[in-house]
Amino acid sequence: MLGTTWLAKLRGGLAACGLLAVAACGGAGGDDGPVTVSVWAWYPEFKGVVEAFNASHPDIKVEWTNAGTGADHYAKLKTAITAGKGAPDVAMIEFQQIPTFVILDALADMGEHGANEDKDLYAEWAWQQATDGEKVYAIPVDGGPMALMYRKDLFDQHGIPVPTTWAEYAEAAVKIKAADPAAHIASFGSDGGWLNGLMWQSGCRPYGYSHTTAKDQVKINLTAPECERVVDLVGDLVDKGLMAKDPFFTADATAALDSGKYWTWAAAGWTPGYLAGSLKNTAGKWAVAPMPQWTAGADEQGDWGGSTFTVTKQARNPKAATTVARELFGRSKAAWEIGLDKAFLYPLVKDVAADPAFTGKAYDFFNGQKVNEIFVPVSEKLGDFQFTPFQDFVYGELNDRSAEALSGSRPWGTVLEETQKNVVAYAEQQGFKVSK
Amino acid sequence: MKVKTRLPHLLMGAGILYFVVPLLWVVIAATKSQPDLLDSPALWFAEFNLFDNIGQLFREDDGVYGQWLVNTALYSGLSAVGATALAAAAGYGLARFRFPGRRLFETALLGMIMVPATALVLPTYLILSEVELVDTMWAVVLPSLLSPFGAYLIRVYVDESVPVELIDAARIDRAGELRIFWQIVVPMMRPAIVTVFLFTLVATWNNYFLPLVMLSDADLYPLTVGLTTWFNTAQQEAGTRMLFNLVVTGALLAIVPLIVAFVLLQRFWRSGAAAGALK
Amino acid sequence: MTRSLPITAPEADDPPAAPAESRARRRSRRVTARPVAGMLFVLPFFLVVVAFLVVPLGYAFWLSLSSKSLALGTRFSGVDNYVRAFTDPVLLDGLLRVVLFGLVQIPVMLGIALAGALALDAVTTRFALAFRLIAFMPYAVPAVVGALMWGFLYSRTFGPFADLPTLVGGEPIDFFSVSLLLVSLGNIVTWAWTGYNMIILYSALQGVPRELHEAAVVDGATPVQVALRVKVPAIKQAISLAAIFTVIGTMQFFTEPQIMARFAPQISAGYTPNLYAYNQAFAYSDFHYSAALSFALGFLVFVVAYAFVIVNNRRRVARS
C-alpha cells in the first residue's frame, strides 16, 4: 500500500465520511434486504451460474463483472489493491496466482468464516494450493489435469503406436514427419502454464513457498534433472523441426490443429470443450490417451490451469463474500450443470468429477470416447505442487528465454539455467532469502 | 506534362495500394462468417454475411457493443469539447495578455507535450480512486481534458491571425473581455479550433491505456477496450465463444465514424494544420 | 505508438536572423497588460494541468523515491530505483531495441511521407486528391484496432501475405518470428503515421513561395531537381519537427507491442521501456520501480528531444 502522508490524510478523511455514511444508512446490507457481493470473473456462461446463486440465496445478491480475461483482469485487480479501494469482494484467481495475491496482502482468510469445512469436498492437490495451513485463501473451482490428445485416425492410418513414454513420443515425432513433411507432432506453445504442467508431470517441483511459516523465504530449483529433461526433450524436437513454434490459442495454432498439421497436443481437462467448438474439420478424429511417462510403467501426472474464487481484504462483508466464494459452484448442482455442459470446466469438486454423469459422458468430438475416464484419475493422482509469490515474473522469464531458444539465439540447454539465475536475482532483489 | 506527372502518379498509386489494402481486408473480412474467415481466401469475398455479423455484433453479451459505441462517442465528444474550450481560452490568454508567470507557463507548455502518457495513468488512477471517481466515465473524460498541445497551437494561431488592434478597438468600445473573446476572437480562430477539436476527438476515441486501467465495468468500456476484451475471450475460450468475426466487424464499425468525420471536415482541419505547419 | 496530438508544431514565428531584442519589443507590443483577465482565461486550463499533470507527476516522483519489495515492504530509498533502472539489463535492452527501431523506421516513414508530399505538391489531379484522403485514413484507425488488424493480416490463417512465398515453392513467412518482429511492428507504425506526416509536410510545401521553383525551372532544372534542391530545403524546419515528434512517439512505443504480444508471445515483458514500466506496475506490482522507469524514460525523451532542437537550431544559425 502506498501511504503518503497527505494522501493518507485524504484517505483518512474519506474513510471517516464513509463511516458516517454507513452509520447514517443504518448499516449497509443489514436487515433491510440482501447483502450485495461484487464478483470479478471471466468464466464462460457465468451469467447463469450467478442467476442460480441469487435464486437460491435470498439474503445475498451477487453482482458480477467481467473485468477482462487473464492479464487484464489481474492488472486491474492489482491496481485496485494498490489503491486500497476499487477491488471486488470476490475475485476469480488462477492457482498459480494465489501466492502472488497473498503476499500483496490482498486476500482474506476464509478459514475465519468456516471455509475449512470444505476441505474434503475438493481434490486434495487443489485444496493444498488454495490454503496455507489453516488459512483458506481460495476456494477451488476448476482444474486442468493433463493428458495426451492425438489424431487417432492418422496414428492408425500410418501404424504409429500411441506413445506411452516420452522416448516413444520422440520416435513418433520422427515417424510423423516421415509420413507428412508438413506435419508436426505438436507445437511448442510459448505458454508458461503448459511448460509448467509438463515439468510437474516430470516430477519436477521447482518452487516452494509458505506465507504462514516463512514469508520471506522461497525455494527455486528449475535446474533439477526432472525439470531439465522436459526442456531438453521439447527443445530437441523443436531444433529438429519435429515440433512447430506456434503459440497456443492463436488462430494459427487452432487452424493447424484443425488441418492435420499437429497430430498431438499434451492438453488438459478443459480442452475437450475448448476444442469442440473451434475444430470443425477434425471433430470425431481425435482421441485422448494418458500422458507419456518418463519411466515406462510409471504414473506421474501434471496439471495445466485451473482457477479459484478468493475473497479480497477490501470485501465489505467478508462473511457473505465467503459464502459466495464457497457456493457459487461448490455443491451447487445447477451451477455445475452449466459449468460442465456449457463452460466445459473440469470440476475440482470430487463428487462432481466422480459422478457417472461426468465420467460416463461420451464426446462426439472424440468419436464417442469417454475421455473423463482418463482425466479424473489424473486429477486424483496429482500431489503437492507449489508456486512462487511472483509467478508472473517466472513465467515471463521462462517465456522470454524460450523465445530466444526458439529463434536460435540461445541453446535450449541454457534456458532453465538462465531462468533460474534471473529469477533468483529478482527474488533476492525483492528481499527474499532463496534456497534451492 | 505527361512525363512530368508520371513519377508522382506512380508513387501515389503504390501509396494507395499500401494504405488501402489493409482497410480493404477489414471490409471484406467483416462480410464473412466465422468459419469462412478462417478458411476462405483473405482478400476475396466468401458468402456475404455482413448483416448477420452486424446483427450478432449488437446482440452479443446483451448488446454491449452498442453501449461501447455510445460510450466512445460520449467520452470523446465531451473530452474534445472540454479540451478545445480550455485550450482556446488558455491559448488566447497566453497570446494576448501579460501577467506574472506567463512566460514560464509558456515554456512549461512545451515540456508538457513530452510527458509520456503512460507515466501519468498510474498516479492519476491512485488519485482518482481517492475521490471515488475510478470506474466512472469521469475517470476517462477528466484526464482527457488536458491538451497542452492544443493550447500551444491556439496560442500560435492567435498570435498570427488575431490582430491586437482589433481587440484594442473593441475595448475602446467598452466591450467585455468575454464578449471580445466569444464574438471576435473565436470566429477568427475557427480553423485552429476545429483542428484542436478533431485531434482531441481522435485522441480520446483511440485511447486504450487510460480506459483500460480506469474502468472495470464492461458497460463503461469504450470500443478499444471492449474489442480487445472480446479478442482475448476469442483466443482463450475459442471453443465456447469464437468471436473473431465480431472483433473484425466491430473494428470496422469503430473506424467508419472517424474516417467519415475526417473526410467531411477536411477543409477545416487542413487549414488549421497548415496554419500550424507554416507559422 | 501513443501520441496525443498532431505534430503540427509551428516553426519559429520570426526569421532566424531576427535579433532577440527586436523580437522582445514586438512581443510586448502585442500583448495587453490586463493581468486579471488574462489569468482568468488561462485559469481553467491551468487547473486541469495541475490536477492531471503536476499532481500525478509529483506523486509519481514521490513514489519513485521509495522502494517496495514483496518480502520487506515499503521503505524510502532515494535514488536507488534510478540506479537500478540505469543498470537494469532489461531496460537497457529495451532502450537499445527502441533506438534501433527508430533509426530504421523513422527515416523510412518520413522518407515515404516526404515523397508522397512532393508528389501531391507536383500534381493536382483527382487521383492526387484520392491519394491524399486514403493516405490519411490510417490515422483515424485506433492504434489498438490497427495492431489487431495487422495481427490478423500477418497470421497464416487470416492474412493474405504469409503464404505468398509458397506460390513459388518457398516457406511461408512468419511475421511474428523474433527476426521479423521489429520489421512487422515497424510496418504497423509506418502504415498508421505516414499519411499523417505527409499531410503536415504537404501543408508546409504549399507555403513555399512559387517564385522559388519557377526560377529554378527557368534555370533548366528538372522537376526532380526542383523537388530535391528547392522544395525540400525550404521545408527543412517542418521535416525536423515531424522528426522530433516521431522520436518522442517512438521512445514511448507501447500500444502496438502490447497488442501484438497476443499474437507473438516472444514480445517480452521488457520489449520496450514503456512496456517494461507497464509490466513492472501491473504485472509485478512494483509501482515504485515503475514510476522510476517512467521518469527515467521521460527524462531521456526530454534530453533527446531538446538535443535535437538545439542541434537543429545550431544548423540554422550556421546557415544564415
Image: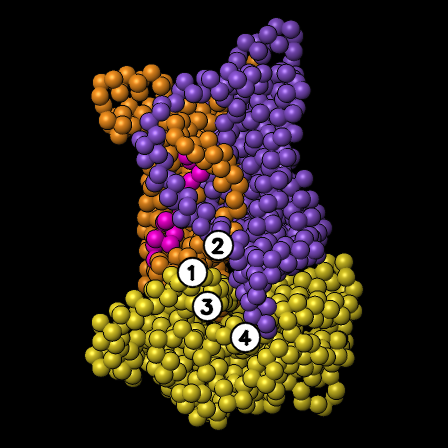
Chain colours: A yellow, B orange, C purple
Where residue A348 appears, as percent x and y from the top left, is 49, 85
Q: Which residue is mark 2?
A: C59
Label 3 – label 1 distance at C-alpha:
15 Å
Q: Is the C-beta separation of discs 1 and 4 under 8 Å? A: no
Q: Which residue is mark 1?
A: A7
For badge 3, the amino acid type reads Ile
For badge 4, the amino acid type reads Ile
Residue A30 visible in this rendered orientation of the protein: yes
**Residues at discs 2 and 4 both on one chain:** no
**Vertically, is B115 above or below A274?**
above
Q: Residue at x 47, y 77 (%)?
A: A107
Residue A103 marker: 4
Q: Which residues are magenta?
A: B135-152
**Vertically, is C245 above or below A337?**
above
Q: Residue at x 45, y 79 (%)?
A: A108
Residue A81 marker: 3
Dividing the image into 4 quarters, which one contains the C terminus of chain C? top right
- In the picture, measured across the screen, residue B263 lies left or right of residue B14, that is left
Q: Is the C-beta separation of discs 1 and 2 under 8 Å? A: yes
Label 2 – label 3 distance at C-alpha:
18 Å
Quadrant in which residue A291 is drawn: bottom right
| Label 3 crowd (10 A; few <14 / some 14-19 / many >=20) | many
| Label 4 crowd (10 A; few <14 / some 14-19 / many >=20) | some
Label 2 – label 4 distance at C-alpha:
24 Å
Q: Secondary structure at mark 3?
A: helix
Mark toward the viewer: 2 or 4 = 2
For badge 1, the amino acid type reads Leu
| Label 2 crowd (10 A; few <14 / some 14-19 / many >=20) | many
Q: Chain of mark 2?
A: C
Q: Chain of mark 1?
A: A
**Residues at discs 4 and 3 both on one chain:** yes
Quadrant in which residue C246 is drawn: top right
